[in-house]
Amino acid sequence: MTFPAPLTGVVPPVCTPLTPDGEVDVPSLVRLIDHLTDAGVHGLFVLGSTSEVAYLTDAQRRLVVETAAGHVAGRLPVLAGAIDMTTPRVLDHARAARAAGADAVVVTAPFYTRTHPAEIARHFRLVAAGAGLPVFAYDMPASVHTKLHPELVLGLAAEGVLAGLKDSSGDLGSFRSVVTGARDLPGAGGFTALTGSEVVVDAALALGAHGVVPGLANVDPAGYVRLYDLCAAGDTEGARAEQERLCELFGMVDVGDPARMGGSSSALGAFKAALFLRGVIACPATAEPQVPLSEAEVERVAKYLAGAGLL
């Protein structure tokens, strides 16, 4: 498909349903995609953090992209994470995503080794030259331990290297600098600024974000589509009320006991438990070595769903 520039709307980072033995559950993934598209989302982002990309084998990554791209069949743009430690490995993932039918790739800075901003810029240039698809920068310092500064992002955008930014930094001021700076780029209007936040979507859209990539949209896609539409219509009060409802629902990410599991286990476990409880996926398993939620923790997820009218 012709990739929209800018890409607007709600673009959920799609969870990867797994079988009890850790394989990709393709029928559940298809149901999840239908659950999202039926709610009116505007695109799909597979192989991001919420997709557990770091835990998947190369074969599993390709299967996820093939399934998503094949099922939507051009009805929506499919962005695929090409996330790895070094440029050659990222290029391998990007080319595989293209062959599997992705419409764009989402790429972090290199990680594991410490990289200079000049090396990060070189990384994105090389990926853009070799991927054969639009490249979105993924600002995720909590995972890659490097912040993508607005000057770097805007410079690469001006060169035509980056088609957009998916900002999961939690730094709304930095995101604002990208949004405002992008207005002065050559051919202004084509660069896409997406926020990865669940809880400040209304604020980010008010700043000029083009779209939103909230993990919680797996659980309540209709809520985020409604929030986006309210913001687009200028209904500030309605948008605030919907955002506050979604903030309450987002509390499910903290159901896990921090004495026995990390934040990833708790948040992704909660999203998958919610999807299981809603009948969307067949199994709430998360990838190893994440710790599964207990029965009591799943019951807490159910209370959040009930409180939001989703169960």
Image (spheres, rainbow, N blue to C red):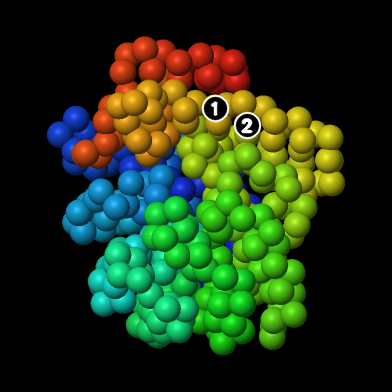
Nearer-the-camera pick, 151 or 211 = 151
Residue 5, can we see it?
Answer: no
Q: Which mark is residue 247?
A: 2
- Please say if the residues under marks 2 and 1 sit with CB atoms less than 8 Å apart: yes
Left or right of 154? Residue 35 is left
Residue at (62, 26) in percent of width and height: 248
Q: In the image as oriented, which residue stretches furthest toward the left?
A: 21
Closer to us: 208 or 174: 174
Which residue sits at x=32%, y=14%? 295
Q: Distance between the residues labelled 2 and 1?
A: 7 Å
Query: As shown in the figure, which amino acid type bears the numbered disc 2?
Result: Cys
| Whole-percent x, y for residue 179 in the image | 69, 66
Q: In which quarter of the image is residue 264?
A: top left
Instruction: Identify which residue is drawn at 60% across, 20% down.
Output: 308
Which label number is shown at residue 132?
Answer: none
**Image quarter for residue 40?**
top right
Q: Where is residue 73 in the image (x, y as percent from the top left)?
A: 42, 56
Above or below: residue 115 compared with residue 45: below
Quarter of the view holding residue 153: bottom right
Give the side of residue 241 with respect to residue 288, left or right: right
Secondary structure beneath dot 1 equals helix
The 10 Å Cα crowd at callout 2, few under 14, some 14 to 19, many 20 or more, is: some
Q: Nearer the viewer, residue 288 or 142?
A: 142
- Give the amino acid type for the residue marked by disc 1 in the picture: Gly
Can you identify the residue that label 1 sits on? 251
The secondary element bearing badge 2 is classed as helix
Q: Where is residue 55 in the image (x, y as percent from the top left)?
A: 25, 48
Residue 93 horizontal side relative to residue 256, left or right: left
